[in-house]
Image (cartoon, grey):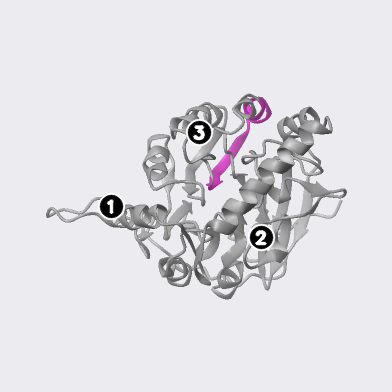
Amino acid sequence: MRDAPSRLQTGTPKVTTTPLPVDEVSNTGLLASPSGGGQPSLRQVWAEKRRIMEAQNLEFGLDGPRSLWPSRIFSFGLAMFRSGVRLVGLHERGRRNALDVKLVTHSIAFPDLLPSFDGYRILHVSDTHLDCLPDLATVANRLLAGVEVDLFVLTGDIHGHHRAPLDASTGPLADLIGAIRVQDRRLAVLGNHDPAGMAEALDELGFDVLINQSTVIARQDERIVVTGLDDVHRFFTPDALHALSQAPGGFRIALVHSAEVADHAATAGYALYLCGHTHGGQICLPGGRPIITRLRRCRYAAAGAWTKGNMVGYTSRGLGVGDVRLRFNCRGEVSLITLCRSVPDV
């Protein structure tokens, strides 16, 4: 089912239009192509550090390291909730809800958007977790078949269960992306459920994986800058904030798994911030109010459209589900966002 489009009018974003070479890529963090001379590439250095973090029983956020035990206790509580749902006969309803995914469309106006990008279409997909509920791949394929966009962005948590092989997630994703026509590029960032090896797996699917790095997309002689960060909820390093602050000038878009550095992006002058992580709550009160968002900061950005200063943000409710493969009062989604210089009155 496809929802009617919404229209968001923004204030004047803090943007510039500094000309950049078409192929310029700013490696402001730990990601680059392999280097010569027998030295490890920045990607290899990042991957080694990431694996060390993954092996520790800690989460690394902006507030410093914290124990994973609260998360494990939370997971135990979810397992009890799942059992309770079965006992009261609501499990099948919750599963049907999880498979009832919608395509939402938004037109967002930026008065300083470069003319060549007026009408630019971005497909935003997050939290696919296709290893958790494989049937979602069939649903999403049907929903997105024949969709044509300029840019396809994937904002993390491609994987779901850490014990599942990566191809349980990337195999269905490969079928999904084959249904979508993309004119420019496919960009991706990693989430807190994605191990370091997911970066290479996404490379093989044709994504440019941005890990604390910026890249440029050109139209005629005008350009926009897209900055992508490694997950900041569990695997934060200072490289993430450095990447935001040191990105090339221009109309800038941030791709981050979580909204937890939205305030930093707004301060740095980004126009648009796309993220996921929360699943919109997944299990919500009537009216879609999240009960739990798993955000440590920037909790105002738990779901849907929001603003921070002159920056517009959108937090996807996610395509997939986590260990509890159910949804209540919160439909999964993929988002089609059109950038406009102005949104005409209806």
Q: Position of residue 248 (x, y in %)?
A: 43, 67
Q: Is residue 185 left or right of residue 196?
A: right
Q: Which residue is mark 1?
A: 44
Compute the Cα span from label 1 to label 3: 23 Å
The kind of residue on which mark 3 rests is Ser
Mark toward the start of the polypeptide (1 vs 2): 1
Residue at 40%, 45% (x, y): give it. 199
Judging depth in this view, the residue of 22 and 317 nearest the camera is: 317
Judging depth in this view, the residue of 318 and 72 nearest the camera is: 72
Residue 308 vs 57, above or below: the answer is below
Q: Position of residue 237 (x, y in %)?
A: 43, 66
Neighbourhood count class around disc 1 (C-alpha, 10 Å): few under 14, some 14–19, many 20 upward? some
Compute the Cα span from label 1 to label 2: 31 Å
Residue at 53%, 48% (x, y): give it. 156
The answer to whether one can see residue 277 in this image is no
Q: Is residue 146 magenta?
A: yes
Q: Which residue is mark 3?
A: 169
Magenta region: 139-156
Mark toward the start of the polypeptide (1 vs 3): 1
